[in-house]
Amino acid sequence: MADRRPSIAQDLAWRLEALGFDLVGLLFRLMPIETASWLGGAILRRLGPLTGAHKIADRNIRIAFPELDPAARKRLLVAQWDNLGRLTGEFQLMHRLTPSSGRVEIVGGERLRAVAQSGEPAILVSGHFSNWEVMAAVIVHLGVKCQVTYRAANNPYIDRRIIETRRSYGVTLMAPKGGDGSREVLAALGGGEAVAFLNDQKFNQGVTAPFFGLPATTAPGPSRMALKFGCPMIPMSVERIGKAARFRVTIWDDIAPEKTGDRTADILKGVQNVNAFVEARVRERPDEWFWTHKRWPKAVYAEGRAEEKA
């Protein structure tokens, strides 16, 4: 079935929003990358706390780190807005944030080079760490033919611009999440390509596994596909080096679940491995994770609100 055409009012709103996106992007592209990164951080440090997303981030941090006192929690909230703002400024200049620029250090690159040379499929998993776009640039740099999954932006004009920006630093193969994307992913794996997932957000129809000691529904797709194709599931992470627009990308050891014959248990084990990996990275650098997403079930948030009022 063809998609419904938007109303004239909706299309106009999208175009105006895209114009604003273009103007902000132009502003950042005219700056040195350090300035763009700093300005993005400065803007969101000021504006982020005024948004509804700030309350979500605050509740998430209370859930994950209940031991933090109010002052420490406030510092973390400001720091995570700084990181998200820096990513916003840096995104328009991603063609200057590739490994060949000298701004990206790679640890464990031999693991992805082996994938590239094998001609066999692989699952790459990560989370919304630091500037997560840098990881895609590293995958391209190391010669891995890879479908990078993503959630298309609600605004189709902005979505096109995001795709074009990613192409500027070499990411040309992207499978959107959803029905069409699933078919592309399976075809890619069947053809010996790799597929990359950011596997750290809530997925309502997912598998429930612990995350910071609480139940969290997680997309089982990466684990399911690793089992189906008998391929490695390789985690990646990225961190800032200081506050500058410089990064370290680490490629970690395979965490694919073993095939035991119990498919349900094997998929659960894979999801548990992913959640444990993401949690470990967040605990190491909590200011560089995407806290403004509701990661846990509604009941966890309801319980947290009740405790705050008590």
Image: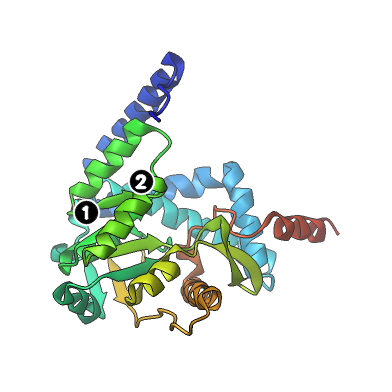
Relative to 133, does residue 273 appear above or below in the rendering? below
Badge 1: how crowded within 10 Å, few (<14), some, or many (20+)? many
Can residue 97 be spotted in the picture?
Answer: yes
270 left or right of 167 in image? right
Q: Residue farthest to the right?
A: 310
Q: Tell me the residue at 76%/55% (across/down).
A: 302
Q: Which color scheme does this rendered protein use?
A: rainbow
Mark 2 residue type: Asp
Q: Is residue 73 left or right of residue 257?
A: right
Residue in the foreground of this view, choosing between 235 and 138: 235
Q: Earlier in the sequence, mark 1 or mark 2?
A: 1
Which quarter of the picture shows residue 52?
top right
Query: Which secondary structure lies at badge 1?
Result: loop
Q: Nearer the viewer, residue 274 or 188?
A: 188
Say above or below: 151 vs 243: above
- Rendered image quadrant of residue 119: bottom left
The C terminus: image quadrant: bottom right
Q: Where is mark 2, residue-wise?
A: 180
Q: Disc 1 residue type?
A: Val
